[in-house]
Image (spheres, rainbow, N blue to C red):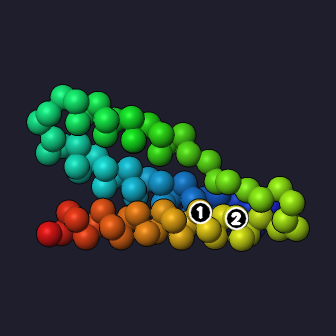
Amino acid sequence: MTSDLLKYELDFQFKKVQLTELYMQFYEHICDPLEQQRLMQIIVDLIARRPRLALDALYFRDSYKAELDCLDANIELLSTIIAT
């Protein structure tokens, strides 16, 4: 059970790194100082993000799975925007 938790936490942190790298690519191309500040705050919030665990559930897998799916969707969206 502990190894499962570590695996899900590792996956969660890795997805956050991938998403942060995509946001950093956006940041490198922004000239407006206000937009830079806004994007910096998004990046800081992402780095501080923790999974929302359902404490009434019997197992944490579903909570981590939902968070990972959300991060995957964000990564896919930003990757598509960068590719175009």
- Identify which residue is drawn at 11% across, 36% down: 31
Dot 1, crowdedness within 10 Å: few (<14), some or many (≥20)? some
Point out residue 25 in the picture as x, y percentages from the top left corner: 23, 50
The answer to whether 69 appears left or right of 38 in the picture is right
24 or 77, which lies in front? 77
15 or 77, which lies in front? 77
Asked if labels 1 and 2 touch by Cβ distance under 8 angstroms, the answer is yes
Residue that badge 1 annotates = 67
Point out residue 28 in the picture as x, y percentages from the top left corner: 18, 43
The answer to whether 82 appears left or right of 48 in the picture is left
Quick check: can you spot residue 75?
yes
* Amino acid at the residue labelled 2: Ser
Point out residue 1 in the picture as x, y percentages from the top left corner: 83, 67
- Identify which residue is drawn at 74% across, 61% down: 5
The answer to whether 17 appears left or right of 23 in the picture is right
* Amino acid at the residue labelled 1: Glu
Q: Secondary structure at mark 2?
A: helix
- Identify which residue is drawn at 36% across, 70% down: 76
Judge whether 36 appears above or below 24 on screen: above
Dot 2, crowdedness within 10 Å: few (<14), some or many (≥20)? some
Q: Secondary structure at mark 1?
A: helix
72 or 2, which lies in front? 72
Quick check: can you spot residue 3?
no
